[in-house]
Image: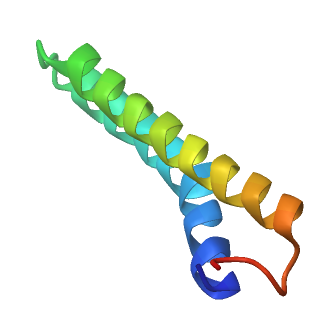
Amino acid sequence: MKNSTYDKLKYIAQVFLPALTVFVGVVLKCFNCDFTDIVVTIMTAFDAFLGSLLNVSTKKYNENGVENYGK
């Protein structure tokens, strides 16, 4: 994975998705939607999944070094 791709995904996982999840949860709650908890749970699960994938990528990168990454 390129550094720029990693940086973008890291921003999405650490900043964008948590903020979006809170926003969606508040808006749906304001409209008294019955499925608010389900939507927020799915969004949170996806963010945790993305964070886990990025952690695995970081761990492999740190173990193998830049010159051997992806080989």
Q: Give how far across and how far down residue 11 sits, in percent.
A: 63, 64
- Vertical placement of residue 53 versus 37, above or below: below
The image quarter in which residue 60 lies: bottom right
Q: Residue at x 52, y 35 (%)?
A: 48
- Vertical placement of residue 30 versus 34, above or below: below
Q: Is residue 62 left or right of residue 14?
A: right
Q: Which of 44 and 6 is in front in this view?
A: 6
- Vertical placement of residue 28 versus 64, above or below: above
Q: Is residue 28 left or right of residue 34?
A: right
Q: Is residue 26 left or right of residue 56?
A: left
The colour scheme is rainbow
Which quadrant holds the N terminus? bottom right
Q: Give how far across and how far down residue 21 sits, in percent.
A: 42, 38
- Vertical placement of residue 55 versus 39, above or below: below
Residue that lies at the very extreme toward the front in this rendered image: 71
Q: Which residue is drawn at 43% across and 31% down?
A: 44
Q: Is residue 25 left or right of residue 14?
A: left
The image quarter in which residue 71 lies: bottom right
Q: Residue at x 40, y 29 (%)?
A: 45
